[in-house]
C-alpha cells in the first residue's frame, strides 16, 4: 500500500482566509444592525414627537369648536394671538419641533371655523463644522 502524503499547508491557509472573511462579515453585520437600531430609535422618537404635537393640535381644535359652539368666541382661549384678519394663532412646541395652527371663525353666527394654517416645523441650524466647502459658484 502506497501512502500519499497530505499537504496541510494550502488547506490551513484556505481555512485561515475563510475564518478571517467570516469574522469580518460578522463584525460588519453586527455594526450595521446597531446602526439600523440607532436610526430606528431616532425615527421612533421623531414620530412620537410629531404625533404628540398633532394630538395637541387636535385638542386645540376641539377647544375652538367648544368655544365657538358656546358663543364665547376665540378671545378667551389661552396662549393664542389674534391678528388683524381675525385669524387666531396658537403655537405648540415640543423640543425642536413646533406646530403653528391658525383658525378663523366662519359660518352662521360664527359658530364654525376654518383651519387656515397647520404647519409642523423643526428648528434647523446649518452645520458649519466642516469648514469652508465649495458652494458651486465660480
Image (cartoon, helix red, strand yellow):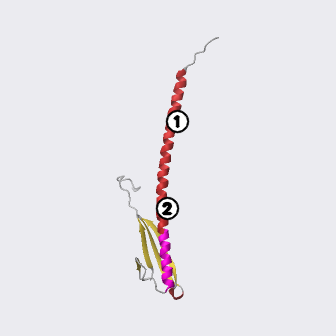
**First in sequence: mark 1 vs mark 2:** 1
Where residue 122 appears, as percent x and y from the top left, is 43, 64
Q: Label 2's element? A: helix
Outermost residue to the right: 1
Which residue matches tag 2?
A: 47
Outermost residue toward the top in this view: 1
Is residue 66 covered in magenta? Answer: yes
Q: Quadrant of the C terminus?
A: bottom left
- The dot on residue 30 is none
Distance in Å between CA atoms under marks 1 and 2: 37 Å
Decide: is 58 above or below 75.
Answer: above
Query: In x, y percent, where is residue 136?
Result: 41, 55
- State whether residue 121 is above or below residue 79: above
Q: Quadrant of residue 91?
A: bottom left
| Magenta part, dominant SS | helix
Q: Secondary structure at mark 1?
A: helix
Q: Nearer the viewer, residue 132 or 96?
A: 96
Span colored in magenta: 54-70
Residue identifier under label 1 = 22
Residue 55 image position (x, y, % from top left): 49, 69
What residue do we see at 46% from left, 76% from top? 102
**Residue 25 is inside the magenta segment:** no
At x 48%, y 78%, the residue is 63
Quadrant in which the N terminus appears:
top right
Amino acid at each position: 500500500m502506497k501512502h500519499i502524503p497530505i499537504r496541510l499547508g494550502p488547506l490551513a491557509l484556505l481555512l485561515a482566509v475563510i475564518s478571517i472573511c467570516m469574522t469580518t462579515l460578522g463584525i460588519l453585520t453586527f455594526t450595521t444592525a446597531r446602526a439600523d437600531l440607532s436610526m430606528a430609535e431616532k425615527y421612533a422618537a421623531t414620530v412620537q414627537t410629531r404625533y404628540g404635537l398633532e394630538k395637541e393640535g387636535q385638542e386645540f381644535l376641539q377647544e375652538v369648536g367648544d368655544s365657538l359652539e358656546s358663543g364665547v368666541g376665540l378671545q378667551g382661549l389661552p396662549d393664542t394671538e389674534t391678528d388683524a384678519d381675525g385669524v387666531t394663532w396658537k403655537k405648540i412646541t415640543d423640543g425642536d419641533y413646533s406646530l403653528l395652527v391658525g383658525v378663523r371663525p366662519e359660518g352662521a353666527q360664527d359658530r364654525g371655523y376654518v383651519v387656515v394654517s397647520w404647519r409642523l416645523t423643526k428648528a434647523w441650524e446649518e452645520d458649519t463644522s466642516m469648514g469652508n466647502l465649495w458652494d458651486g459658484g465660480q
